[in-house]
């Protein structure tokens, strides 16, 4: 394989990329519709703050499986064929989407059904996350891995941000259509994953006891402060700055733009992310990548604050869209830098377990962030919750620069020559 080969020219990786993009697009489209339906159903019988509490609970239900299963899913991804884990979870997610489509078609949607299916999706994602993250480096030659990580991050980020507006638009056209399209995308993902042939399997080393092997992923993160700092930065920053969790409330009760307006609001971060992704594909980051990661998180927080108070300005919808686009662009930079650092600074036999912790942190920043935003909105109102979250995100970026100087010292994406000489490990030894 030529060193200059593009990862998408490799058939196995191309199938992986299509599966990752399709599943991410589908799942994130479902998330926004589930949130809308939970709030809409709750508002029929509850006052606004109690309905906001249901948004917090639905985020918590999706996060709990990730928290409880992290150690198990990481070891599973390192010991069992990662292709079959990904295929099985995609099939389960497809069945959940089909069930939601049928419930919506027959107007039988209720809170218990939404919570049960959300929990099943949480279980599927708990297993899929580390398996998919760890599978990608097995599909390309080592010299192509940095480009493969960037392309994979692009697929995940664009799918994660483009999925919600797609779901919102489809739901506005015909409610069951949103879930039906998600089911179709997940079926496509399953087929693409079936096309991937046998891949090299990493050999799990270290403790032979299963419990000890599970804990080795956490032990590795404690030694590797660069990876730990990058992962935890996302958790605490997005956990506090979860403005997107409040979009159903903003669309319905603050900006008064309805379900179609919700689609516009969710499209804005996608546009911002797409513009930045195109920029990064043409002019990728080479220097001071750690500093740029911290700056991106701070910009994310500032955009969140401005979005929170945008309703006070003339033409509040336009300002809200600009803020959300800026938020999405900053998030794209953050994901690109963070995922590249994590993959390049983690040995293959640890990628499943480190990926499981990464999935926990990333999903924690999303689902648990939704729970935090919903609970806080129930206590102090949605506007105060969004503004306070943005301020907290900026504070996290400043604090992490001091707690993890290894991030600032990460000048380039050049991987270590030995995993025993990773920045920060020598201090922890």
Image (tube, helix red, strand yellow):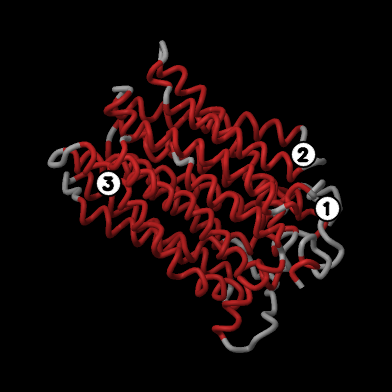
- Residue beneath disc 1: 414
Q: Are marks 3 and 1 in contact (CB under 8 Å)?
A: no
Q: Neighbour class for label 3 at 10 Å: few (<14), some, many (≥20)?
A: many
Of callouts 2 and 3, the N-terminal one: 3
Is residue 147 positioned above or below 360 on the image? above
List x then y, in percent, for residue 106: 17, 46
Q: Residue at x 64, y 66 (%)?
A: 197
Q: Nearer the viewer, residue 84 or 362?
A: 362
Q: Which mark is residue 285?
A: 2
Q: Within 10 angstroms of label 1, few (less than 14), some, or many (20 or more) residues? A: few
Q: Nearer the viewer, residue 316 or 268?
A: 316
Residue at image x 45%, y 70%?
A: 69
The local secondary structure at tag 1 comes to: loop
Q: Earlier in the sequence, mark 3 or mark 1?
A: 3
Judge the density around disc 2: few (<14), some (14-19), many (≥20) Cα neighbours within 10 Å: some
The quadrant of the picture occupied by the N terminus is bottom right
Q: Is residue 169 visible?
A: no
Q: Quadrant of the C terminus?
A: bottom right
Residue 20 in the image: x percent, y percent? 55, 52
The picture quadrant where one finds residue 206 is bottom right
- Look at the image and tell me whether residue 395 can be seen: yes
Could you tell me if the residues under marks 2 and 1 are in contact, i.e. CB atoms within 8 Å? no
Coordinates of residue 344 in the picture (x, y in percent): 75, 58
Which of label 3 and label 1 is nearer to you? 3
Q: CA distance from mark 2 to mark 1?
A: 12 Å
Is residue 332 left or right of 25 when viewed as pictured? right
Q: In the rendered structure, which disc, 2 or 1, sits on the residue that comes first in sequence?
A: 2
Q: Is residue 424 above or below residue 171?
A: below
**Spot occupied by residue 49 in the image (x, y as percentages of width and height):** 24, 39
Residue 53: assigned label: 3
């Amino acid at each position: 394989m030529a060193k200059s080969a593009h990862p998408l020219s490799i058939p196995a990786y191309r199938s992986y990329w299509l599966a990752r993009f399709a599943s991410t697009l589908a799942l994130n489209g479902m998330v926004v519709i589930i949130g809308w339906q939970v709030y809409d159903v709750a508002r029929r019988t509850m006052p606004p703050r109690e309905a906001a509490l249901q948004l917090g609970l639905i985020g918590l239900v999706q996060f709990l499986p990730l928290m409880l299963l992290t150690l198990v899913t990481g070891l599973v991804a390192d010991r069992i064929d990662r292709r079959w884990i990904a295929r099985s979870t995609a099939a389960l997610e497809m069945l959940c989407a089909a069930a939601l489509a049928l419930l919506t078609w027959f107007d039988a949607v209720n809170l218990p059904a939404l919570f049960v299916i959300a929990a099943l999706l949480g279980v599927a994602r708990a297993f899929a996350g580390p398996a998919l993250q760890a599978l990608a480096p097995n599909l390309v030659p080592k010299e192509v891995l940095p480009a493969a990580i960037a392309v994979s991050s692009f697929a995940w980020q664009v799918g994660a941000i483009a999925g919600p507006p797609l779901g919102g638009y489809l739901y506005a056209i015909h409610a069951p259509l949103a879930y039906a399209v998600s089911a179709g995308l997940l079926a496509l993902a399953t087929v693409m994953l079936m096309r991937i042939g046998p891949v090299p399997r990493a050999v799990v080393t270290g403790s032979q006891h299963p419990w000890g092997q599970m804990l080795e992923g956490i032990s590795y993160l404690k030694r590797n402060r660069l990876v730990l700092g990058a992962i935890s930065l996302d958790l605490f920053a997005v956990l506090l700055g979860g403005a997107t969790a409040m979009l159903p409330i903003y669309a319905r009760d603050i900006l008064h733009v309805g379900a179609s307006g919700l689609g516009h609001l969710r499209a804005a971060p996608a546009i911002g992310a797409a513009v930045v992704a195109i920029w990064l594909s043409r002019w990728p980051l080479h220097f001071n990548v750690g500093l740029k990661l911290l700056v991106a998180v701070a910009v994310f927080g500032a955009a969140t604050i401005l979005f929170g108070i945008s309703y006070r300005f003339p033409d509040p919808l336009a300002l809200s869209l600009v803020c959300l686009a800026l938020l999405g662009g900053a998030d794209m930079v953050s994901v690109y830098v963070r995922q590249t650092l994590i993959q390049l600074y983690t040995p293959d036999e640890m990628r499943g377990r480190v990926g499981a912790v990464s999935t926990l942190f990333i999903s924690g920043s999303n689902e648990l962030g939704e729970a935090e935003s919903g609970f806080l909105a129930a206590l102090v109102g949605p506007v105060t919750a969004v503004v306070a979250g943005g301020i907290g995100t900026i504070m996290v970026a400043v604090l992490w620069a001091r707690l993890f100087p290894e991030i600032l010292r990460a000048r380039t994406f050049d991987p270590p020559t030995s995993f025993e000489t990773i920045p920060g490990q020598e201090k922890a030894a």
